[in-house]
Image (spheres, rainbow, N blue to C red):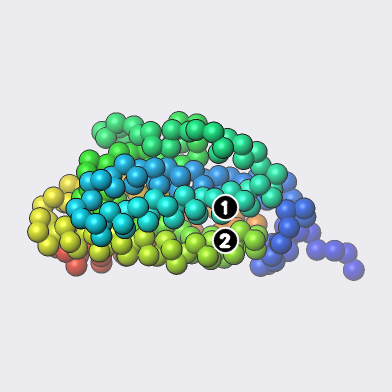
Amino acid sequence: MSEMPIEDYLAQGGRLTSPGNVPPRYRGEVLRLMAAFVDSELAASAGFADVINDAPGITSRIASARIVLEKADHAGRVLKVMADFGADTSRYVGTHPWAARVGRDADIGAARQGGDMRLAVFHYPFTGWADAVVMNVLQGAAAVIQVQEFARMSYQPLAEVFRAILPVEVRHAELGREGLAQIVATNPESVRASVQYWHPRVSLGFGAKDSERFEMHRRLGLRHRPNAEMLAEWQATVAAQLSEHGLKVD
């Protein structure tokens, strides 16, 4: 009996456990996914570091500092898997402008910028604490859905890392909702503009609804749920969370 081609094995739900037996296309796509995640976590960490001192009180400062620390830790965990794949991780040893942002009114769509692979949403700046909290609520909900998807991927060592990361990302999202509740209790008008600003920018992180790359990822066992399905879940999730405070997306 002839051996099953590895692409067919993956398409039928097979799992891989070592970088030594992965096909070139699979290797390239896994490295791309990891780079996008690592760069996004580092950019997110740097962005929240800039608003720690804007936090209103010790509890909020601790929550923000925890997010800064743990997102950097998540990047480090995935970076170790990248190194196993033979990726050149030296670019993460030196300095890189992870805190760099475009203008608030810039419109870069979903395009990559600045020489790294962060999601486009992490190129936009905060205008203050309330704005950062709103972004954390919206992006936190997106991160949970996306990490849940990655935790099911066919490359098991990386899936295990994402399964360990998931509960921490869930807690980050919870911290965002707790912060939002505190803000709207005293000044709900302060966050309405931020909701309208961040919602479309976060939504772009789910990718095109008719993505050809998703179909390739599905065949390789790297993804399972279409972009449109994940986006719809996120939209419903954040709509429910915002409605608790009388907020909605226009």
Q: Can residue 248 be seen? A: no
Q: Nearer the viewer, residue 121 or 203?
A: 121
Instruction: Tell me which residue sits at (12%, 62%) in the image.
Output: 185
Instruction: Give the image location of residue 78, x and y in percent.
Output: 57, 52
Residue picked out by circle 1: 78
Q: Is residue 143 left or right of residue 62?
A: right
Q: Is residue 24 left or right of residue 244?
A: right
Q: Is residue 73 above or below residue 164?
A: above
Q: Which mark is residue 4?
A: none
Q: Nearer the viewer, residue 233 or 195?
A: 195
Q: CA distance from mark 2 to mark 1?
A: 7 Å
- Pick the quarter of the image with the N terminus: bottom right
Answer few, some or many: residues within 10 Å of disc 2's Cα (few below 14, many 20 plus, some between 14 and 19).
some
Instruction: Give the image location of residue 66, x and y in percent.
Output: 37, 56
Q: Three-letter amino acid code at disc 1?
A: Val
Q: Is residue 133 above or below residue 163?
A: above
Residue picked out by circle 2: 161
Q: Is residue 153 left or right of residue 105?
A: right
Instruction: Give the image location of residue 41, x and y in percent.
Output: 45, 48
From this viewpoint, which residue is outermost toward the front?
58
Q: Secondary structure at mark 1?
A: helix
Instruction: Tell me, yes or no, whether the two marked residues, 2 and 1, touch with CB atoms within 8 Å.
Output: yes
Instruction: Give the image location of residue 25, x and y in percent.
Output: 69, 47
From this viewpoint, which residue is outermost toward the right?
1
- Among the 4 quarters of the image, the one containing residue 235: bottom left
Answer few, some or many: residues within 10 Å of disc 1's Cα (few below 14, many 20 plus, some between 14 and 19).
some
Q: Is residue 133 above or below residue 116?
A: below
- Among the 4 quarters of the image, the one containing residue 137: bottom left
Instruction: Tell me which residue sits at (34%, 32%) in the image.
Output: 102
Q: Secondary structure at mark 2?
A: helix
Instruction: Tell me which residue sits at (55%, 39%) in the image.
Output: 92
